[in-house]
Amino acid sequence: MGKGILSFSYVLRVTLFLLFVVSHMSLYAQSDKIISGVVSDQSGVPLPGVSIVVKGTATGTVTDFDGNFSISVSSPKAVLVFSYVGFITQEKPASSKQPFNIALEEDIQSLNEVVIVGYGSQKKETVTGAISTIKGSELTDVPTSNLSTAITGKLPGVVTIQSSGRPGEDAANIFIRGQSTWVDSSPLIIVDGVERRTFSQIAPNEVESISVLKDASSTAVYGVKGANGVILITTKRGEVGRQKISVSADLGAQQPINIPNFLGSYDHLLLRKQASINDGLNIENDPLISDESLEGFRLGEDIFRYPNLKWYDKAIKSLSFQQKYNVNISGGTEKVKYFVSLGYLNQDGMFKYTNTHNRYSSDTDFKRFNFRSNLDFKVNKFQTLSANISGRKDTKNGFPNISNVFQSLIAQVPYAFPIYNPDGSYAAIAGQGNPIVKIAESGYDRTDVNNYDIVGSLKNDLSFITDGLTLDMNLSYNSSTGSTKSYREQAGTFQYNSVRDDYDQITEYSPLSYTGESPTTTFTRLGIQANMRYTKTIGKSKINTTLVYNQQNDKSNTSNPFVLMGYAGRLEYDFDGKYLAEINAGYNGSENFAPGNQFGFFPAASLGYVISNENFMMPLSSVVTFLKIRGSAGLVGNDKIGGSRFLWQGLYQYLPATGSRLQYIGFGTTNPSSLGGIYETRTENRLLTWEKSLKQNIGLDAKFFGNRLLDITIDVFNEHRTDILMSARSLLNTTGIPSPQYNIGEVKNWGYEIDVSHRNTIGEVGYSLRGWYSFARNEIINYDDPSGTPVMQKYAGYRIGQYRGYKVLGYFTSQEEIDNSPDHSTLGGPIIPGDLRYQDTNGDNKITEADIQPIGFSQVPEIIYSITPEVSWKGFTLNATLQGAANASVLFTSNAGFEFGGAAGGGQVTTMHQDYWTVDNQNASYPSLHLNPQHSNKNVNSFHLKSGNYVRLRNVQLSFELPELFCKKLNIKNMRIVLSGNNLKTWSKVEGFDPETVDQKGESYPQQKVYNLGININL
């Protein structure tokens, strides 16, 4: 990596120098002609602030309030470029006759923009469903290696939670409009019309657009798979024209965004002493906290007798690096069009000591090679053959048992032993391994995964039968194989005895050896699809129909084969561009359910009214450019009801005639005989079915002031999810058979989304500002709470995933208050002033598990929002995404929350624990300290449940596009240089850990902050 670092530094210096030189370039020439004129719109209204630039130079001006301009040109061959936000850019030779009166044409492309929908596409103007879209070009500059995290903060209603930052395992969990089920809320993923299991490792440079389908009208065609929303990814294709070659290179530096601030040995032991006193322990029996010992740790002069190690800090690099390279080649003729993409990603892990003896690397690095080829062949006048071929090879490396290593890093006390002994050997003590040894010399695992996707399609224009009729057919194949090779070693570790000045061996050395390969996992998916469309215009009426048949066969060596088949249909009606109607339906069958209960029908309908196209709105057209209201309702399903195949079937377990437990039937007491039997582990339920979701949505789309100043989208939605699979809780389990599973769960989910954007040009400065806000709240209606369950113990009426624990009312401030309060000692003592005081929910004057109640929120935020400003000037563009979440909670226990990790005599403490309660510090932020891991304070409660609200500077990009004349000298079309960052700053109330984490113990790989330098060249 040394060469990589030198390369990064060198490129950075050269780029900064180039930016400085180019930004100060100017053209010195005598102006020999002054051109004047007026710029207006098509109706003759003058346009102020129109940018006029001499093409290929930095010479420019803007129109005044009345649309007038004057500019000097140095050559009669010069070309003037007129640009204005919301209007089509025009070019005009300087040699044209004067006066220069230019009438710009309004750019209505955003209304005519095509939006990808299920099994087809629609004009954005006529869409009646709730759909959010983003172009792939908006993601390529985001310096993240994972596409699922690149969309964070970009799409209203899309919640992303990244639980790990480990290279190769940094995909985000995605929720569309919150949660409506506690089983599986993951959306359906469709890539180029074909269902895929994931999209996280698709390179952003390959992506043309992403559409997120959120309501029933847009997802009903996916039937039993559409209830959780659908993400449609369309990859790039070739276009007719000369060959285009795009080359990009990105070099990034990474560092963890949150590191827990653990205390050093001296401060740690001071808190240990106070905790011992609080627990009534005799501190004279603990030599670690004697005056002599504390003074030794304070001075820190003898690192072997008085070690002081913050293990987490020691193990983590200050910077790690990542590299990304991509080449796109596209072009075509009327006969053949092509798009080819090659990419390479190399991410280093964040750990030190991973190549100590240059024998192997145990760092958590990740490499990805990706390839895509999208080809279109015009076979004849009526047929086009397309072939999409893509592949990806992922290689993930790392030391074994990474979660165990993180546990060691945050649990190992700082005073136990140093990394190395005086003689250079690894240090350890009995029962406590050296965390650095686990990283550096425990061996490594190398996982290789190969993915291949092939889609062949034939598009048939059947206009020779009747105008507007087409038939598309495709055959798709997906293959994924993976395996892990393991290598293990064990370093010798020793405990140094400073009194005897010798060593006791803790572990013996074992050389690196190959320990085997995990069984190769294989997955294949074969799909066929036929799509017939018919378009007809009759007067002012436009009718579009779509009929689809699809079948999917999945095979894996780890599960039974799976077959899904279905039909889908869509009917669109558009009258005069004003009145819109759409009917969608899916009819799906899944063999995962019992015969006779395998097919379902999922209908939906939507209406739209484009008010701005009415004649009575014409006088307001200069203000109200576009105004549409829309509404939809329908039924969709979710077949992700559990990980097991054939959940409806009963299961039985054979009990042997012998065993260490009473797993058999015995006869007699003297020389007893035994007989095996069969035990029913799951009761059959042939009525088992998928979840059903009834969704309603009302929306408004509006554009004001010439399609440039204000763009507003508002959606209000409601969902009623029924038939959620769960074990019956109200049935008494008296038979010894686990409670059967039924479709009895029920949830309501409702909310709204507001998306507002503004863009304009002032002089030579173009700017835009977008902000959106999404709210989604769920409520459990039925969780089969047993009759007589106390209200606070029920799940009905509360939220999915809402935490449950003791509600903290404050601190005990005196012994008298403790004596006059409900008994807390049943949860672990001693209870002293400064301890947490819980609410006696059931009023029985003692705190027990019966007082546990819903507290806080769930980990999935109810509120997400984003603000994205952008400013551009003379080739420079600066944009940022500020993203946030609210109404979320995160629980921290063990070493992430409790003092001393909740472990007797061990575990770490942080700066948070230093502000503990005492008589002289009653406004402390932390309660009294205790060594007792079972103390009342260390239960799940509202004190340790922290706010998961945060605001994050998700990404920032500063780009510069070199002038055209300069690029011509380099024989390239254009060049962009981009400085960018990701996860640059987070504001939250969580200390030392990420508020987005789902790991309450703090033992997961932290998210990474990235600083990136990128160069993009188009040839």
Image (cartoon, rainbow, N blue to C red):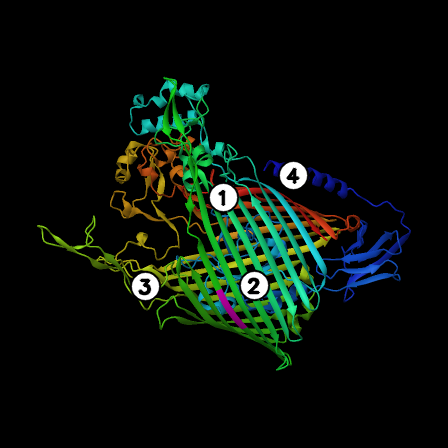
Indicate which label's residue lies in the foreground, 3 or 1: 1
Q: Secondary structure at mark 4?
A: helix
What residue does disc 1 label?
397
- Under mark 3, the amino acid is Tyr
Q: CA distance from mark 1 to mark 4?
A: 23 Å
Q: CA distance from mark 3 to mark 2?
A: 36 Å
Magenta residues, start to end: 526-530
Q: Earlier in the sequence, mark 4 or mark 3?
A: 4
Where residue 403 appears, x then y in whole percent?
42, 42
Q: Nearest the camera: 597 or 998?
A: 597
Question: 726 left or right of 220?
Answer: left
Q: Residue at x 27, y 40 (%)?
A: 822
Where residue 662 appears, x then y in whole percent?
19, 51
What residue does disc 4 label?
7
The answer to whether residue 647 shows anywhere in this view is yes
On whether residue 309 falls in the magenta region, the answer is: no
Q: Earlier in the sequence, mark 2 or mark 4?
A: 4
Question: 178 left or right of 75?
Answer: left
Q: Secondary structure at mark 3?
A: strand
